[in-house]
Image (spheres, grey):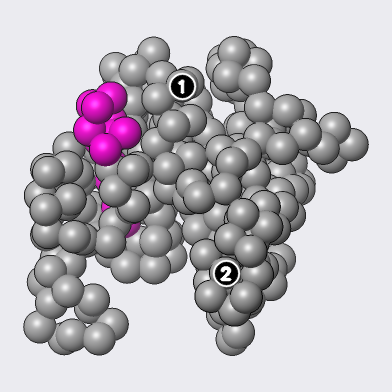
Amino acid sequence: MTGSPVEESAAGGSAKPIYDRVVLKLSGEAFADPATGYNIDPSIVASIANEVALAKHLGIELAVVVGGGNIFRGGSASLRGIDRATGDYMGMLATVINALALQDALEQIGIPTRVQTAIAMQQVAEPYIWKKAIRHLEKGRVVVFAAGTGDPYFTTDTTAALRAAEIGAGVIFKATRVDGIYTDDPEKNSDATRIDELSYIEVLNRGLRVMDSTAISLCMENKLPIVVFDLMVEGNIKRAVLGEHIGTTVK
């Protein structure tokens, strides 16, 4: 299963998804209190869960990779004197907190969910096993991947690319605070314009900060398209699944 069309579901009506298995990448900031940019806002997590449910009801198989920057960011911690590897491990633990919050919100609205972690913590989550993850997806469960790759020096963007390749996903959805990739930071430059479509090489050569270069290279090698869009627009995850032209596509 690598992104071919799936049969329409009863819940999806006449709408037909163009992907059958997707990986949704969510930053830790997506979970945060808007006033501070930190911690977890339960109402926002509930809203994200509802958006995931809208897409899931189309009949697709959906996995989620979560970041942890709303709680702890390993890279920036190293600039403040914490050992880089130690900081990265701390950041991985932060992603588990976000994953459990999302699992709880999804299961409260009837979406069966499993959290799999790259660092063993069997009291709260399953260890990551790719064949078991695929089996969960085939049974209709959402799978949330936490703790990054389990190794320091790798971002959760790279995790998203790696997990998508391992489970045979057809696309990575990167849901962000902006509605695509711009020529410059739109929050700082009002003249920045949105780019509708880019190649992997263009992203790398132009130094566009969509994902880190390791993640982009992994996607390029595995021919995994990336769709970047605004998470805060209601229904956008569903629109992306249906193939509507939103945000920016990298392929």
Residue 74 seen in the figure:
yes
In the rendered image, the quadrant that contains the C terminus is: top left
Which amino acid type is marked by label 2?
A: Ser
Residue 18 seen in the figure:
no
* Mark 1 element type: helix
- Decide: is 114 above or below 48: above
In the rendered structure, the answer to whether residue 84 lies left or right of residue 13 reads right
In the rendered structure, the answer to whether residue 148 lies left or right of residue 247 reads right
Distance CA(mark 2)–CA(mark 1) = 30 Å
In the rendered structure, the answer to whether residue 14 lies left or right of residue 92 reads left
Q: Which residue is mark 1?
A: 166
Front in this rendered view, residue 140 or 126? 126
| Residue drawn at 61 percent across, 32 percent down | 143
Residue 170 coordinates in the image, percent (x, y): 33, 26
Front in this rendered view, residue 233 or 133? 133
* Mark identifier at residue 50: none
In the rendered image, the quadrant that contains the N terminus is: top left
- Residues rendered magenta in the picture: 217-229
Q: Which residue is mark 2?
A: 78
Which amino acid type is marked by label 1?
A: Glu
| Residue drawn at 56 percent across, 55 percent down | 67
Residue 58 coordinates in the image, percent (x, y): 45, 31
Indicate whether residue 86 is drawn in magenta. no
In the rendered structure, the answer to whether residue 73 lies left or right of residue 218 reads right
* Mark 2 element type: helix
- Decide: is 34 above or below 216: below
